[in-house]
Amino acid sequence: ADIHAAAHTLAHNGGQGHGGSHGAGVGSALLGYIGIDTIIEQMRKKTMKTGFDFNIMVVGNSGLGKSTLVNTLFKSQVSRRSAGWTRDEKIPKTVEVKAVSHVLEEGGVKMKLTVIDTPGFGDQINNENCWEPISKYINEQYEKFLKEEVNITRKKRIPDTRVHCCLYFISPTGHSLRQLDVEFMKRLSHSVNIIPVIAKADTMTMEERQEFKQRVRKELEMGGIEFYPQKEFDEDMEDKSDNDKIREAMPFAVVGSDKEYQVNAKRVLGRKTAWGIVEVENPNHCEFAQLRDFLIRSHLQDLKEVTHNIHYETYRAKRLHENGGLHPVSCNDTQESNL
């Protein structure tokens, strides 16, 4: 009872000692070292063993440099680059969805990266409903995960093929968004994390780029389109201020390149033009570095959490509700009887 009373007092004091200003009040209440701080290290070891999954989808017209940008992001040839259409090849009549997985390793951390490409999107004269195969693919991955989850004997670690992030490439027209862009983002923003980017930003001057970004932001706002990071999922004030800065900078105007050039005795990734080299990682040239830091270095885990806790939960609740609850299946039953 004394321990409970002490714990209650500590909680009541907000973890502060009698002085009220001593941040170490909680620490000093412990008589000696317990080792609670090793929990982080234990978690690190566990997660390092299992590795990480990250599934990124790229959507946009052909010729916007989607493959190149993904290769630049992960500094390796992770996305297949078609060298344009050959004479015999036909432009796909419908949107295809192709997923290619790779295992990347850096500093002992393993990541299974899946790049999901959508060739044929927006390339037809009539692009009506061309988002449907993409929406279908996203929902199929949720369905696959849900089926595994409702099994009586389920896997300890369900393979995660859910799309954590969708990079949507906007053409650098300098005018406004196309109807297709608005429709796609409106329809899919509630089932996947959409990050809009302005492709091939080196085709515009700095002033044009700034104006275009503001116009795109305004159009997204008028269309009621929520892109990632969504305002309603900010957990605290610190999150809110960090994410507000990102939201004000989006959509990032990016340039991708997997070629290296020598600039001032340094090797840099860039694009060679008649008047000089556009340095991909130079923040004065384009916003690729900002996108990379946001996508990989600060928000990768959050993208996965929002996918699991928000988008997948929404899908799961809807499915269970309309089905009167999915019935669990035993290993002997067929997978189809799950529905």
Image (spheres, rainbow, N blue to C red):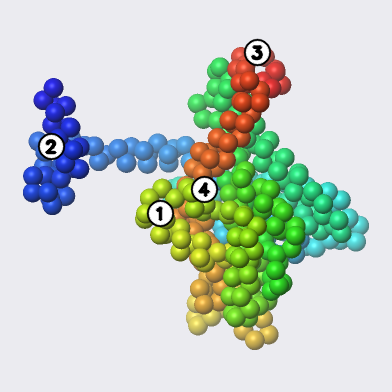
Q: Residue at 45% of width from left, 55% of height from top?
A: 298
Q: Quadrant of residue 181?
A: bottom right
Q: Residue 216: x and y, percent?
A: 63, 66
Discs 4, 2 touching: Cβ within 8 Å: no
**What percent of the width, then of the height, locates residue 259?**
62, 70
Q: Amino acid at mark 4?
A: Leu
- Mark pair 4, 2: CA separation: 37 Å
Quick one: SS at disc 4?
helix
In the structure shown, which secondary structural element does the residue marked by tag 2 occupy?
loop
Residue located at (51% from left, 30% from top): 157
Task: Determine which quarter of the picture holds residue 268.
Answer: bottom right
N-terminal of the pair, mark 3 or mark 4, is: 4
Q: Earlier in the sequence, mark 2 or mark 3?
A: 2
Res. 332 mark? 3
Dot 3: element: loop
Left of 38 or right of it: where is 195? right
Task: Check disc 4 and report the residue beneath it.
Answer: 303
Residue 239: which numbered mark, if any? 1
Between the C-alphas of marks 3 and 1, the distance is 47 Å
Q: Amino acid at mark 1?
A: Asp
Can residue 68 be spotted in the picture?
A: no
Q: Position of residue 54 (x, y in %)?
A: 55, 46
Q: CA distance from mark 1 to mark 2?
A: 31 Å
Where residue 202 appears, x then y in whole percent?
A: 64, 75
Q: Which residue bears the numbered disc 2?
A: 30
Residue count near mark 1 (Cα–Cα under 10 Å), binned few <14, some 14–19, many ≥20: few
Which of the two discs, 3 and 1, labels the residue nearer the N terminus? 1
Q: Quick one: 290 or 15, which is closer to the camera?
A: 15
Between circles 3 and 1, the one closer to the viewer is 1
| Residue that protrudes farthest toward the bottom in the picture | 275
